[in-house]
Image (cartoon, helix red, strand yellow):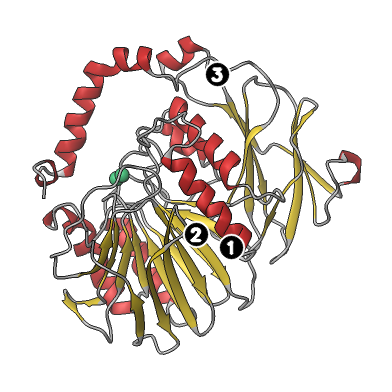
C-alpha cells in the first residue's frame, strides 16, 4: 500500500485542487489538448445515450464547432444511405447549447456546441439508422440497436477510469483508444452488445478540452466497421463533478443526480448509483425502493457505481461510506453483482454476505477501472479478493435466462478473468488468478 492511499480521498481531492490551481497556467500553455478548433457545423462526436428504458428511449447527441441554426436528426428502421428525403422520421434538436469553457479554452478558440435529440417512441430490439444534420452539413449514416423488451439475451461491455492515458490525451494509440478498440472488437464479435456501461472517471476534470478528446476517441474507436454506435450508460465519479459532465451526458428532466435504473431486458436490470453525493438520505431510500420493486421480477440485478465498497488498491476503511449505506441492502435483496471502479486495477471478490465470504448468499464485486488510466498494484492478500490483476481491460457481461457470464478481456484480447452465476445463483463458476 502506498502512502497516498492512506490519505482520505477528500483530502487528496483538495490537495490535487490546490496543486492544479498553482500549475494551471503552465499546464494550459503546455497542454497540446487545448487547441483551436476550426469553426464548422460539420457534426462530430455523434453518440447515443441510454438511461432507464433503452427499449424505448435514447438521446442522439453530437457536437459542432460553430453554433449553427438548424440541427436535425433523420432516422428510420431501414438504412437510407444518408438520403435525407428517404428517412421516415426527422426531429429538430431538443436541446442545443454551448459547452462551458475555461478561460484557457476560450482563448485557444475551442468553442463548441452540443446538440441533443430525445427519442421516446422507439421500438424494442430494433436497429435505427440515422443521419444528423447541422445547417446542411450531414454526418454519415450510423445506426444503433434498442434493447429487447422480452427475455432475449443481452450483453454489456463495462469499462471505468478512462482518464489521462499515459501516452497523452491526443495520442492516436493511447491506452484509452486501445480499450475503445477492444470494445469495438467485442461489438463486432457479438452483435447483441447493447451498450457500454461506464464506471466513471472519464477524464481528469470534466472540462471541454478533455471531454472533446474523450468524445472523439469514443466516436472514432468504438464505432464498428458497419457504422454501429456503442450507446453509453454513464455513472458519475470523483473526476466528473464539473458541469461539462452534465453537458456531455444531457438527458431531459433528469429526476436524480445520475442514479437510475436501466431495464436491460425483461429479466435484467442495472442500478446505477452516484458515489459523489450522499450515499445515505434520498439516494439510499431510492435504492431500497428500487431493490424491493425489482428483485421479485428480475432474474438478474447488477449495480454500478464509481468508488468501490471492496477496493483492490485503496484503503478498506476509506470505502466505508458506500459499504455501510448500500451493501446491507445488496445483501438483503440478493443483488447479483456490484460493478466498481476508481482503484485502477482488475479485481473480483469472493461472494460476500454480511461481511464474510459466503458462497451461497454472497454478492460478487468486480471491476476497479481499466479503461485507459495507468494501472496500480492491487493487494491480493485482502481476505475478500478472489482475483486481481493489472490490465487495461473491459468486462463483457452476458445476460441469459440461465446464466450471467462475465469475462474480463485485456487489450491483447486475452481473457484474464472469468466467472458466471448459473440459474441456481448459488453456483459460481470461476477461473481467474492473483497477479
Ligand atoms: Fe479513477
Ligand atoms: Fe475515481
Q: Residue furthest bottom?
A: 424
Disc 1 crowd, CA 10 A, few/some/many (<14, 14-19, 20+): many
Image position, residue 409 (x, y; %): 43, 60
Q: Alpha-carbon neighbours of circle 3 within 10 Å: few (<14), some, or many (≥20)?
A: many
Of residues 230 and 431, which is closer to you in this image? 431
Up-down relation of residue 292 to residue 183 (above or below): below
Residue for badge 1? 193
Query: Are the residues at dot 1 and dot 2 in contact (C-beta closer than 8 Å)?
Result: yes
Q: Is residue 230 shown left or right of residue 200?
A: right
Residue under the point 32% across and 57% down: 282
> Between disc 1 and disc 3, whose residue precedes?
3
The answer as to whether callout 2 falls within 8 Å of ligand 1 is no
Residue 90 image-quadrant placement: top right
Q: Secondary structure at mark 3?
A: loop
If you read the primary sequence from the N terminus, does the residue marked by circle 3 or circle 2 appear first? 3
Specify which label sits upstream in the sequence, 1 or 2: 2
Residue at the disc numbered 2: 157
Residue 72 appearing in the image:
no
Point out which mark residue 35 bears: none
Q: Nearer the viewer, residue 410 or 288?
A: 410
Q: Is residue 103 left or right of residue 346?
A: right
What crowding class fits label 2: few (fewer than 14 Cα within 10 Å), some (14-19), or many (20 or more)? many
Pair 3/2: label in front:
2
Secondary structure of the residue carrying numbered label 2: strand
Gap in angstroms between the C-alphas marked 1 and 3: 34 Å
> Regarding mark 1 in the picture, which secondary structure is present there?
strand
Q: Are marks 3 and 2 in contact (CB under 8 Å)?
A: no
Numbered circle sitting on residue 111: 3
* Image location of residue 99, percent across then percent down: 52, 26
Viewer-proximal residue, 235 or 371? 371
- Residue 393 shows up from this direction: yes
- Quadrant of the rendering where the C terminus is positioned: bottom left
Amino acid at each position: 500500500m502506498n502512502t497516498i492511499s492512506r490519505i482520505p480521498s477528500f483530502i487528496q481531492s483538495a490537495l490535487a485542487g490546490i496543486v492544479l490551481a498553482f500549475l494551471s497556467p503552465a499546464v494550459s500553455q503546455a497542454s497540446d489538448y487545448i487547441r483551436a478548433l476550426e469553426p464548422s457545423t460539420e457534426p462530430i462526436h455523434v453518440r447515443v445515450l441510454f438511461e432507464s428504458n433503452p427499449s424505448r428511449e435514447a438521446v442522439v447527441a453530437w457536437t459542432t464547432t460553430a453554433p449553427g441554426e438548424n440541427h436535425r436528426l433523420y432516422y428510420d428502421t431501414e438504412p437510407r444511405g444518408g438520403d435525407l428525403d428517404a428517412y421516415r422520421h426527422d426531429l429538430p434538436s431538443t436541446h442545443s447549447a454551448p459547452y462551458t469553457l475555461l478561460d484557457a479554452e476560450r482563448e485557444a478558440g475551442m468553442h463548441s456546441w452540443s446538440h441533443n435529440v430525445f427519442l421516446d417512441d422507439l421500438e424494442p430490439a430494433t436497429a435505427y439508422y440515422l443521419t444528423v444534420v447541422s445547417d446542411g452539413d450531414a454526418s454519415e449514416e450510423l445506426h444503433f440497436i434498442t434493447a429487447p423488451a422480452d427475455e432475449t439475451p443481452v450483453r454489456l461491455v463495462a469499462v471505468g477510469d478512462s482518464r489521462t492515458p499515459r501516452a497523452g490525451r491526443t495520442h492516436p494509440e493511447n491506452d484509452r483508444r486501445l480499450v475503445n478498440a477492444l470494445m469495438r472488437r467485442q461489438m463486432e464479435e457479438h452483435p447483441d452488445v447493447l451498450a457500454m456501461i461506464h464506471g466513471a472517471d472519464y477524464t481528469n476534470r470534466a472540462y471541454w478540452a478533455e471531454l472533446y478528446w474523450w468524445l472523439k476517441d469514443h466516436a472514432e474507436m468504438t464505432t464498428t466497421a458497419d457504422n454501429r454506435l456503442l450507446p453509453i450508460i454513464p455513472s458519475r465519479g470523483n473526476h466528473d463533478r464539473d458541469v461539462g459532465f452534465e453537458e456531455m451526458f444531457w438527458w431531459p428532466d433528469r429526476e436524480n443526480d445520475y442514479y437510475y435504473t436501466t431495464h436491460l431486458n425483461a429479466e435484467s436490470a442495472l442500478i446505477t448509483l452516484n458515489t459523489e453525493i450522499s450515499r445515505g438520505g434520498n439516494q439510499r431510500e431510492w435504492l431500497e425502493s428500487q431493490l424491493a420493486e425489482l428483485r421479485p421480477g428480475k432474474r438478474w440485478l447488477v449495480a454500478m457505481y464509481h468508488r468501490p465498497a471492496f477496493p483492490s488498491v485503496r484503503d478498506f476503511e476509506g470505502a466505508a461510506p458506500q459499504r455501510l449505506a448500500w451493501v446491507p441492502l445488496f445483501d438483503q435483496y440478493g443483488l447479483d453483482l456490484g460493478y466498481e471502479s476508481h482503484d485502477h486495477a482488475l479485481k473480483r471478490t469472493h461472494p460476500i454476505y454480511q461481511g464474510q465470504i459466503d458462497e451461497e448468499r454472497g454478492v460478487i464485486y468486480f471491476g476497479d477501472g481499466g479503461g485507459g488510466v495507468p494501472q496500480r498494484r492491487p493487494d491480493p492478500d485482502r481476505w475478500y479478493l478472489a482475483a486481481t490483476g493489472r490490465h487495461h481491460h473491459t468486462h463483457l457481461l452476458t445476460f441469459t435466462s440461465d446464466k450471467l457470464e462475465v469475462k474480463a478481456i485485456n487489450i491483447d484480447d486475452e481473457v484474464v478473468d472469468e466467472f458466471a452465476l448459473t440459474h441456481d445463483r448459488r453456483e459460481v463458476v470461476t477461473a481467474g488468478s492473483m497477479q
